[in-house]
Image: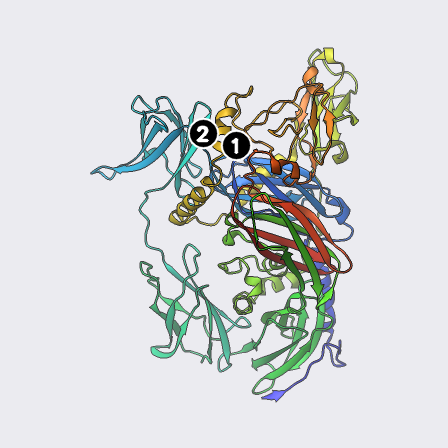
Amino acid sequence: MRYFLVSILFLCMENTIAQMDSIPLKMEYYASFKNTDLLFVHTDKHIYTNNEFIWFSAWLLRCGNDSLPLHRVLSLALVPADTRIVRVQQKFVMTNGYSYGSIQLPDSIAPGECKLLAYTNMMGADSLPVALFTQDVSIRSLRQSDFVAAATILEDTTASKDLLITVRDKVTGKPVQNAELSLWSGNSKTITASTGKNGMYRQNLSALKPININSPMVITKIKYQGDVEYLQHKWPWTTSAPQLEMRFYPEGGYLVSNLPGNIGWESKSDQGEPVAISAVVFEDQRPIDTIKTNEKGLGNFKIVPHAGATYSIRPLAWPNGMKLKEEGYTLQTTLSKGMTISVPQAITGDSLWFNVYATGYSQVTMVVHNFQTVFNQQILPGKEGGVRVLLLLDDVPKGLTAITLLDSNGGPLAERIFFAHYNRRAKCAITPDKKVYEKRQQVKVTFQLTNNQQPIAGFASVACAQANRFDNSKHQDIESFAYLHAAIQDAPAFSTGQGYNDVEYLENVLLVRGWRRYAWQELLADNHQPPMYHTPFISGKVIPGLGKIKKPLTVTILNGNTSVSFVSTDSMGNFTCAYDQLLVEQDKRLWMNAGDKTLDNKLVLHDPFIDINKRLAVKMHFNSVDADRYLQYALDLAESDFQKVKQLTLVTVTAKKSKDESMFGATNACGDYICMGNRLNCYTHAGQSSNRLPEKGKTYFTNGGGTAVYWGCAFEENNHGVFQYDGIKLGKEFYKIDPDEMTTGNPQNISTLYWLPTLVFDKDGKGEINFYTGDITGRFRIVVNGLAGDKLFYANGFIDVK
């Protein structure tokens, strides 16, 4: 092999052709028409139960400098996989590309798989968000009710299948009559019924035909005397055996006759589950190699193909019960003319070695780029035996970068992706003052942030929650997301969700996802349309109670405290609200009215974010659910957590006596409540069943210490003609367990012990947090996602509570 040295320091060669000069311009022009805004959201955990809070922080990791001030609202929506109907939605203020807060799950939410959608107010030409992030979460139901429910599948001789539901009193064992039932499967219709005198109900499942197979469970909701339980049962359909899928990815994009080729390959089921297999490579009918994939379903093998030969792959060993394709598995047709690239190590530091092989080309143009910027451009000669190239990466930023080889017309011949400066990583060390803690004991955790072993300032969000509330299959961290998954959105799954730390996995991923020919075809086209962005506005209309509107009216907006703003309508009663006028504390609501109270005017508000949520919910892709694995996981979680919340049983019984008959405590029209510790709007016990209504004139403890007199809720005094609206929330602070609560008998069964949306690391890279453990024992996980200059970092650690 002849050696040819290429340095990134030489930006241009004297013999560069005119076509080369146009590539950076085309790249820059192409990038100006592509949206690159990137949003990341960190949640405190992945698995929640009814009435818990989802705590979050959201960052715009990438956007244009001119567009950053335009991202002013963050919208969150929770969408169940089965119904695709938005269950919870809320908006939060975003400032300088940052937002934080929490949303509370309703007590009536059904268990299942959900997707949390997050996006900003900037919309593209299709009126959909330009910055969208999704996070898979699970909802589990951990209730303590006064009845016991069970469901059984019955099948008769005609193969007709029925679901038999039985409800009995937990104490006496007697049948419960008239328990209200709701049954559905996926996004099927919902059947309502009730139990008979024998406490039973039988439903033929043919009436519940699931449309969405992503959620192959039959869900039954049972409600009786204020208690609610959910039953989940695997749908008893007969499914065909899964089929083995294999895909092959020649390095560079093509197989070329007589040129050495490295082929990445992927093996998985037709449902997308990775499987490890072994197989034999055949040239025509002659075996030439034995190959295999690992447990992630990834592997690679080398071959020197020949024109006219047929290459097939015949499995040797694969999972039991999985069938093979009748048509078999073959490699692509070998080209007689073309280029191949061989990159021994695509996960690299400050330089990259690679080899270029050619048949039928005397020279090609090499372009190093990220589809936004051209970092290097050279003419490479076609040499017999190949050309070895050294690429210095001084001017290339950290992350995924592409090498594309072009012919004289600018058409792509081969492409390979590599990861530059992988070793340049900010690291965060997590050090708790102990490894094991008692219940209700103070925890001190220190952090040390470094870059290249030197201290560096930065900031991060920090969570500490039960370890069994994290699901590796749902893991997303800021490093993996920004550097890998945002660029390769269909990257093969990694069992722990943290494939970014596994170099072997990354090498395989870049090999099977390293060819983007269609992006180049789009880049070379001359029909780019300039991006069109807009932001939706919240508008309304005044509906007159008496007569007609004859002149503009004034709409008064009260934000829950003392702040008041005003909006003028047009002569038809139409008005538009500025975002700043709709800001309100997270636990409050806006109150709006128009005109004189005696006119009995009404307000109708149009919130475009609600319509956007509906459109996104329909478009979202949900992974197929393994029903057996899902139900077993839910059972394990329920068993472990029920042992830790026994104290809640008495509280639940007491809650039935509250004035508003809510299982989870009372709030007034202003959202105010008093917790068991006599604290006004206590964040630690928000939504708990023992909460009661505050009384005007009485003194209560306040969050953060001290006391205050409660002067009542103004909205309850006279709300004639008043319209309530959730508004745009100001993120609230997470209130950890109060030290004053440590000496009380009040239960502290909290799965998230600590959440901080912004922990600041000083110039020495140091940070510190303090919090208390509760009454739940077991392992807790500390998770950190943050930024340090232009570096992103992720870290996690553990503590144990006994």
Which quadrant would the N terminus be assigned to in this image?
bottom right
Q: Where is residue 778 in the image (x, y as percent from the top left)?
A: 51, 49
Q: Where is residue 170 in the image (x, y as percent from the top left)?
A: 37, 29
User: 391 and 111: which one is in front?
Assistant: 111
The label on residue 228 is: 2
At x 48%, y 59%, the residue is 495
Please determine whether, in this image, residue 711 is positioned above or below residue 202.
Answer: above
At x 56%, y 31%, the residue is 688
User: Would you name the residue on which mark 1 appears?
Assistant: 107
Q: How crowded is mark 1: few (under 14 residues within 10 Å), some or many (20 or more)?
A: some
Q: Which of marks 1 and 2 is nearer the N terminus?
A: 1
Q: Are the residues tagged 1 and 2 within 8 Å (C-beta)?
A: yes
- Residue kind at label 2, given as amino acid type: Val
User: 122 and 80: which one is in front?
Assistant: 80
Which quarter of the picture shows residue 518? bottom right
The kind of secondary structure element at disc 1 is: loop
Residue at far front of view: 743
The Cα atoms of the two marked residues, 1 and 2, are separated by 9 Å
State the colouring used for the structure image.
rainbow
Q: Where is residue 179 in the image (x, y as percent from the top left)?
A: 38, 24
At x 75%, y 44%, the residue is 95
The kind of secondary structure element at disc 2 is: strand
Please determine whether, in this image, residue 228 is positioned above or below residue 419.
Answer: above
Q: How crowded is mark 2: few (under 14 residues within 10 Å), some or many (20 or more)?
A: many
Question: Can residue 58 be spotted in the picture?
Answer: no
Q: In this rendering, would 156 be left or right of 183?
A: left
Which quarter of the picture shows residue 513? bottom right
Q: Where is residue 573 in the image (x, y as percent from the top left)?
A: 73, 22
